[in-house]
Image (cartoon, grey):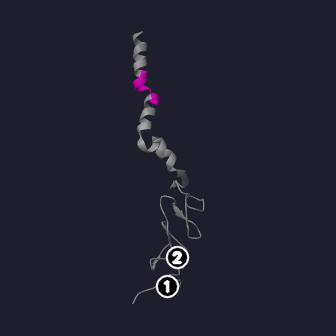
């Protein structure tokens, strides 16, 4: 004999795969309703109505964006630029920004003069 997850058997949780679950991210839902499995790359919490959302937006992030610290942001720009993910651009920027290698050579020349 199998149990059925329905409004009677699951009055304080939501049903997912015929199991009663307590709604808590990433499994969202309303009592006696069907659970929703949230995609954690585009959402970070449940809506009061049992859906998935990023931050307080009321919805998951749109296609091409990810949810980070409660805000949607584009991964495409970071991936194309290579600065955030690659680290190579950061190193290139660190040289001129820090100036230790480049400025050190200039300062050495300045000290010699």
User: Does residue 112 lie above or below 48 as drawn?
Assistant: above
Q: Report the mark closest to the observer, 2 or 1.
A: 2
**Image quarter (top left, top right, bottom left or bottom right) of the N terminus:** bottom left
Q: Quadrant of residue 31?
A: bottom right
In percent of the image, x 43 and y 13: which residue is there?
A: 110
Spot occupied by residue 109 in the image (x, y as percentages of width and height) = 41, 14
In percent of the image, x 54 and y 55: which residue is there?
A: 70
Count of numbered circles on the image: 2
Q: Earlier in the sequence, mark 2 or mark 1?
A: 1
Q: Over which residues does the magenta segment extend?
A: 96-103
**Image quarter (top left, top right, bottom left or bottom right) of the C terminus:** top left
Q: Which mark is residue 71?
A: none
Spot occupied by residue 3 in the image (x, y as percentages of width and height) = 43, 86
Spot occupied by residue 50 in the image (x, y as percentages of width and height) = 56, 70
- Between the C-alphas of marks 2 and 1, the distance is 13 Å
Q: Which residue is mark 2?
A: 34
In percent of the image, x 55 and y 74: which residue is there?
A: 30
In percent of the image, x 55 and y 54: which residue is there?
A: 72
| Residue 111 inside the magenta-drawn segment | no
Q: Secondary structure at mark 1?
A: loop
Q: Residues within 10 Å of mark 1 (few under 14, many from 20)?
A: some
Spot occupied by residue 29 in the image (x, y as percentages of width and height) = 53, 72
Q: Which residue is mark 1?
A: 9
Q: Residues within 10 Å of mark 2 (few under 14, many from 20)?
A: many
Q: Main secondary structure of the magenta part?
A: helix
Q: Looking at the picture, tell me which residue is in the foreground, 64 or 67.
A: 64
């Amino acid at each position: 004999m199998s149990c059925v997850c329905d409004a009677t058997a699951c009055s304080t949780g939501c049903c997912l795969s015929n199991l009663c679950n307590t709604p808590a991210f990433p499994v969202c839902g309303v009592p006696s309703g069907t659970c929703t499995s949230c995609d954690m790359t585009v959402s970070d919490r449940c809506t009061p109505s049992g859906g998935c959302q990023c931050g307080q937006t009321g919805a998951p992030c749109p296609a091409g964006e990810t949810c980070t610290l409660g805000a949607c942001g584009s991964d495409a720009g970071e991936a194309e630029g290579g600065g955030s993910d690659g680290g190579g651009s950061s190193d290139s920027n660190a040289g001129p920004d820090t100036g230790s290698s480049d400025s050190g050579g200039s300062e050495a020349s300045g000290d010699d003069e």
